[in-house]
Every structure is written in structure tokens, then in C-alpha cells.
């Protein structure tokens, strides 16, 4: 029981970090003129090996241009 609470606490931190990074990604792309629905459609197809925010922005831009 004690271990479970420690693990879920760490997971919550990771989720918050992912949410902040996702919001940064959406903000960056909306500043370039893309709409949230079209960004969402591309982000859901993003491979898991795309790790950094810069790489995510580049990947999205390549795929939004198609």
C-alpha cells in the first residue's frame, strides 16, 4: 500500500509535465496559425520516439503541411 502511493505520486508528476509540454506544443503551433482541431489530429499520430518539444514541433509542422 505504501509503495502504491509513492508510484502514483510519481506518475502524477509525469502527467503534469506531459500536459505542460503538450500545452507548449499547442501554443507554438497555434501561434503559427494552425487550429487546435487540426493540431490534435496530427498529434495523435505522433510516434513515441519523438521526445523533445523542438522535435515534436518539427514533426507536427511536417505532417500539418501534407
Image (cartoon, helix red, strand yellow):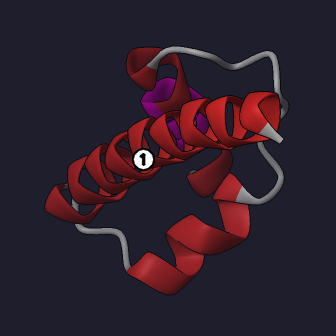
Identify the residue position indicated by label 1 in the image: 16
Q: Which residues are magenta?
A: 57-62
Q: In the rendered structure, does residue 1 fall within the stretch colored magenta?
A: no
The percent coordinates of residue 65 (x first, y second) are 57, 51
Is residue 2 visible in the rendered image? The answer is yes
Using the image as rendered, state which of residue 66 and residue 15 is in the foreground.
Answer: 15
The secondary structure type at the circle numbered 1 is helix
Question: In what quadrant of the picture does the C terminus appear?
Answer: bottom right
Question: In what quadrant of the picture does the N terminus appear?
Answer: top right
| Disc 1: CA contacts within 10 A as few (<14), some (14-19) or many (>=20) | few
Q: Quadrant of residue 33?
A: bottom left
The percent coordinates of residue 5 (x first, y second) are 67, 42
Left or right of residue 51, residue 34 in this image: left
Q: In the rendered structure, does residue 59 fall within the stretch colored magenta?
A: yes
Q: 48 above or below 61?
A: above
Q: Quadrant of residue 29?
A: bottom left
Using the image as rendered, state which of residue 28 and residue 5 is in the foreground.
Answer: 5
Q: At 44% across and 33% down in the image, what residue appears?
A: 57
Q: At 35% across and 58% down in the image, what residue appears?
A: 26
Q: At 78% across and 28% down in the image, what residue appears?
A: 3
Task: Examine the residues drawn in magenta and state their main secondary structure.
Answer: helix
The percent coordinates of residue 45 (x first, y second) are 83, 52
Left or right of residue 41, residue 58 in this image: left
Q: 4 above or below 34?
A: above
Left or right of residue 62, residue 28 in this image: left
Is residue 66 visible in the rendered image? The answer is no
Using the image as rendered, state which of residue 10 and residue 54 is in the foreground.
Answer: 10
Report the label total.
1
Amino acid at each position: 500500500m505504501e509503495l502504491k502511493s509513492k508510484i502514483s505520486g510519481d506518475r502524477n508528476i509525469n502527467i503534469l509535465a506531459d500536459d505542460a509540454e503538450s500545452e507548449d506544443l499547442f501554443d507554438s503551433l497555434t501561434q503559427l496559425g494552425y487550429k487546435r482541431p487540426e493540431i490534435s489530429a496530427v498529434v495523435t499520430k505522433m510516434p513515441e520516439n519523438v521526445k523533445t518539444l523542438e522535435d515534436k514541433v518539427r514533426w507536427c509542422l511536417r505532417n500539418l503541411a501534407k
